[in-house]
Amino acid sequence: MEFVTTGDGSKTLFNAEIGECYHSKHGAVQESRHVFIKTGLDHYVQTTGAADVGILEVGFGTGLNFLQTANFLRDKSFQVEYVGIEGFPLPLSTIAATGYDATVHPTVWTSYLNAYELALTGNVQINEQLKLHIDHTLLMNFQSDRLFNVVYFDAFAAVHQPEMWNDAALGHIAQFVKPGGVFVTYAITGNLKRSMKTLGFSIEKAPGAPGKREMLRATKL
């Protein structure tokens, strides 16, 4: 693993075994805020007025999307229970070296570092609004008693990890999405659109983050 500076000045990790960075080389933080916060969480809350939101992230990684979510919540009143699926959790020392403290409020950063290792073992109350659990498991082994309102699908690209994007994987995640819930990801392909339609989702092409013309938002019918 090595750090790479992306187009917006923020860092990402390059995974040599996979052959890809954890986040967009055009801007890690920009991508997180655009794809997952603006087009996913904020869209869902603005559309539904929900006061209690369950977020499921596929590919928790460095926790960048969680951090941006926690920072976004600082002037909001709704509650979030956040579950991240991560088959290969990073050590805390790597998380601490990301430099993401520069992208969020100091209390968000400190609470995340303090909670990270505990969150790998169970639910952690980050603050009055926010709970975090990082489920150390592979995607197909994930199970949950609750359904989620928003899915952040942030797996490595299909060219590097096709098993994360096939019908079985997408179908496994789809069963945990509430009707009216949204699934957002940085990618959009014909196969992905067809799979999500078959699984009972309506499909929208949304403007992509810098470096990508379009992204996918799918809403469960």
Image: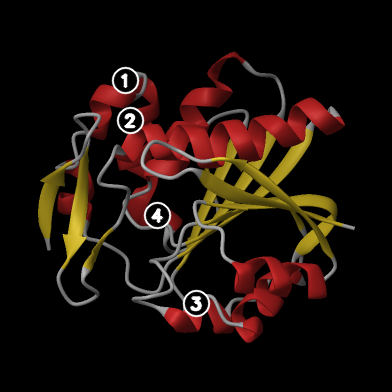
Q: Which mark is residue 106?
A: 1
Residues tagged 1 and 2 counted as in contact (Cβ below 8 A): yes
Q: Which mark is residue 26?
A: none
Q: Nearer the viewer, residue 36 or 61?
A: 36
Locate the C terminus by quadrant: bottom right
For label 2, the residue is: 109
Circle 2: residue type = Trp
For mark 2, does the 10 Å Cα neighbourhood hold few (<14), some (14 to 19), or many (20 or more) residues? many
Judged by depth in the image, the label closer to the viewer, 3 or 4, is 3
The quadrant where residue 7 appears? top left
The local crowd at label 1, few if under 14, some if 14 to 19, many if 20 or more residues have their Cα within 10 Å, is few
Query: In whole angstroms, how far apart are the C-alphas of marks 3 and 4?
Result: 26 Å
Q: Amino acid at mark 1?
A: Pro
- Could you tell me which residue is drawn at 43 percent across and 39 percent down? 32
Residue 22 position in % (x across, y down): 30, 56
Depth order, front residue of 166/130: 166
Judged left or right of residue 16, residue 121 is right
Which tag, 1 or 3, sits closer to the chain's start?
1
Q: Which mark is residue 164?
A: 3
Give the alpha-carbon distance from disc 2 to disc 3, as whole Å: 29 Å
Mark 2 residue element: helix
Q: Position of residue 155 (x, y in %)?
A: 44, 65
Quickly name the residue at label 4.
118
Q: Are marks 2 and 4 in contact (CB under 8 Å)?
A: no
Spatial CA distance of label 1 from label 3 is 34 Å
Residue at 35%, 57% (x, y): give it. Answer: 61
Q: Secondary structure at mark 1?
A: helix
Give 202 or 156, whichever is nearer the viewer.
Answer: 202
Q: Earlier in the sequence, mark 2 or mark 3?
A: 2
